[in-house]
Image: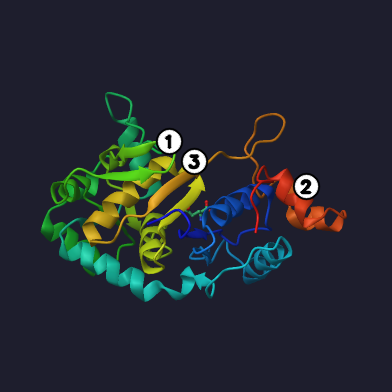
């Protein structure tokens, strides 16, 4: 794969307007696709509580204003549920999923009864203590038959037993060794949405033939987990490139809550697409 033909992607969640952090992320993929590559837009809209169609349209409108357009039809995760279910079925066949009936307060109670502090995963979340992994098959069948709400978790120890050592290519750092086991038994299908971010993003990058994932530094740890899912599913491994997150003058991460930094607001204030691209920190290569 030469660097003039990467297939990159921009995968926002339509939960608000396009902001400068998005622009940096979009341009990072756009500038790396090279003259013969592609740049794909994917709406990560599986969460019906938080995502709005109107935001998806507004995101595409602001991207077009910036001169950025998907080189293939825009993918919507909400249309991919059957494929996510099929992925979960495959993982289930491998024996690496189990239902977890714990509520948040069950888990908090479990943590409070621990002698030592619970382990934190690399993304800052607390590692699930594994309560439901130890459930007897009878109790599990009974709870499922009663229709008890549950998530599906990855049995990390079993999953790691099925794969060789995992690495990926980081365009800046070279070969990176992955340690997905540090996350413990992560959720692969939520209660409210029958899939999880990790499952969907990994599925879609493979389905769309993405060869270079450009994403914010905040998603570096999760990449180890995505590499594990790729290995379990036999999917190809893209290369990765992580961009710094944009911060305000006080060093706080820019987010959609930062209404003043919405591209919409900047457009209305009379800024040009070039002004906005420059403000995002990617003034360089464009075209
Ligand atoms: N949807 C993710 C976000 O908005 C980005 C997708 C990814 O790179 O995993 O942060």
Instruction: Work out whether residue 172 or residue 271 is closer to the camera in this orientation and state it.
Output: 172
Mark 2 vs mark 3, CA separation in Å: 22 Å
Q: Secondary structure at mark 1?
A: loop
Q: Crowding near pointer 2: few (<14 within 10 Å), some, many (20+)?
A: few
Label for residue 218?
3
Q: Are marks 1 and 3 in contact (CB under 8 Å)?
A: no
Q: Nearer the viewer, mark 1 or mark 3?
A: 3
Dividing the picture into quadrants, the one containing residue 60 is: bottom right
Mark 1 vs mark 3, CA separation in Å: 11 Å
Asked if one can make out residue 62 in the rendered structure from this viewpoint, the answer is yes
Label for residue 124?
1
Q: Is residue 253 above or below residue 153?
A: above
What x and y, as percent, mark residue 286? Answer: 65, 54
Which quadrant holds the C terminus? bottom right
The reply to whether the residue tagged 3 has its Cβ within 8 angstroms of ligand 1 is yes
Q: Are marks 2 and 3 in contact (CB under 8 Å)?
A: no
Q: Crowding near pointer 3: few (<14 within 10 Å), some, many (20+)?
A: few
Identify the residue under disc 2: 260
Which quadrant holds the N terminus? bottom left
Q: Nearer the viewer, mark 2 or mark 1?
A: 2
User: Is 103 positioned to the left or the right of 45 in the image?
Assistant: left
User: Is 22 positioned to the left or the right of 84 in the image?
Assistant: right
Q: Crowding near pointer 1: few (<14 within 10 Å), some, many (20+)?
A: few
Residue drawn where x is 60% and y is 62% of the image? 14
Among the two numbered marks 1 and 3 on one chain, the one whose residue lies closer to the N terminus: 1
Label for residue 38?
none
Q: Secondary structure at mark 3?
A: helix
Mark 2 vs mark 1, CA separation in Å: 28 Å
Instruction: Work out whether residue 38 or residue 162 is closer to the camera in this orientation and state it.
Output: 38
Among the two numbered marks 2 and 3 on one chain, the one whose residue lies closer to the N terminus: 3
């Amino acid at each position: 794969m030469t660097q003039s033909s990467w297939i990159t992607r921009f995968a926002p969640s339509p939960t608000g307007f396009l902001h400068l952090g998005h622009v940096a992320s979009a341009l990072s993929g756009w500038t790396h696709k090279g003259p013969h590559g592609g740049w794909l837009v994917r709406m990560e809209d599986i969460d019906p509580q938080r995502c709005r169609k109107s935001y998806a349209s507004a995101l595409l409108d602001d991207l077009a204003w910036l001169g950025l357009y998907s080189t293939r039809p825009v993918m919507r995760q909400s249309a991919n549920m059957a494929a996510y279910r099929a992925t979960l079925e495959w993982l289930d066949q491998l024996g690496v999923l189990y239902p977890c009936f714990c509520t948040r307060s069950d888990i908090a109670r479990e943590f409070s009864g621990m002698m030592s502090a619970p382990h934190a995963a690399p993304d800052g979340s607390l590692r699930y203590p594994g309560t439901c992994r130890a459930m007897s098959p009878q109790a599990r069948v009974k709870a499922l038959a009663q229709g008890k709400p549950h998530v599906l978790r990855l049995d990390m120890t079993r999953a790691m037993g099925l794969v060789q050592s995992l690495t990926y290519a980081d365009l800046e750092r070279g070969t990176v060794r992955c340690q997905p086991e540090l996350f413990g038994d992560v959720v692969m299908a939520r209660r409210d949405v029958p899939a999880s971010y990790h499952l969907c993003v990994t599925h879609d990058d493979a389905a769309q033939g993405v060869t270079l994932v450009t994403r914010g530094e905040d998603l570096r740890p999760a990449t180890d987990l995505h590499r594990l899912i790729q290995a379990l599913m036999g999917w190809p491994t893209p290369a990765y490139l992580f961009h710094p997150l944009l911060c305000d003058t006080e060093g706080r991460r820019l987010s959609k809550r930062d209404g003043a930094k919405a591209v919409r607001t900047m457009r209305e204030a009379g800024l040009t697409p070039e002004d906005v691209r420059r403000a995002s920190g990617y003034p360089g290569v464009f075209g």
